Image (cartoon, rainbow, N blue to C red):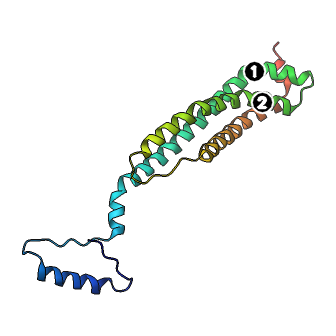
Amino acid sequence: MHIKIRSGHENEVIDFIERKWTEFAPVNAPLIITSLKTEFENLYSTEKKTKKIVILFTIIATIISVLGLIGLATFITLQRTKEIGIRKVLGSNILKIITMLVSDFIKWVVIAFIIAAPVAYLYISNWLQNFSYHININIWIFILAGCLTLITALISVFVIAYRAALKNPVESLRYE
């Protein structure tokens, strides 16, 4: 039985219910009083725990991916040091060099997003089918995630590309 109680009258109503219960109920029948808020909290406690775990692993995965992206950008920039030096000697400006280095990484980030977005959509759709009431998945969530991923990749690779573009071309071409 669900009873809506006005705020401020909880104790009076609960005492009244307990008295009537003992008056009409069988001797061994227990009276269990809980609030609807508590019931909902118990019902969705596993989802709250899952949310915390997903957030934690998302943060860890983001940190690892950014570190990997920085490491890969550093490695490729070191491999292309001579090319960058030659381009600077031939008159290329810093913006063109940065664009050249960053565009390679952005292409792979976009390809990864194109592969990951449908997989995530299917997984979330399947997971939401387990609930009686569920939301519709909007495309703007995936667009926002893609933009955040792209911005993170741009920032992490831009720093490495900027440092490589500022180096003196003489240092990279000295031993050639």
Residue 144: image tag: none
- Label 1 sits on a secondary structure element that is loop
Residue furthest to the right in view is: 91
Task: Give the residue at x 84% y 22%.
Answer: 85
Residue 80: image tag: 1
Q: In which quarter of the image is residue 64?
A: top right
- Label 2 sits on a secondary structure element that is helix
User: Where 82 falls versus 99 (above or below)?
Assistant: above
User: Where 61 falls versus 138 (above or below)?
Assistant: above
Foreground residue among 100 and 9: 9
Q: Which of marks 1 and 2 is nearer the N terminus?
A: 1
In the picture, measured across the screen, residue 37 lies left or right of residue 101, that is left
Q: Residue 167, can we see it?
A: no
Task: Give the residue at x 41% y 45%.
Answer: 129
Q: Which amino acid does label 2 sit on?
A: Ala
Foreground residue among 115 and 16: 16
Q: Are marks 1 and 2 in contact (CB under 8 Å)?
A: yes
Q: Where is residue 91 in the image (x, y as percent from the top left)?
A: 93, 25
Q: Which amino acid does label 1 sit on?
A: Arg
Residue furthest to the left in view is: 27
User: Where 58 falls versus 119 (above or below)?
Assistant: below
Residue 164: image tag: 2
Foreground residue among 108 and 41: 41
Task: Give the residue at x 36% y 62%.
Answer: 41
Q: How crowded is mark 1: few (under 14 residues within 10 Å), some or many (20 or more)?
A: some
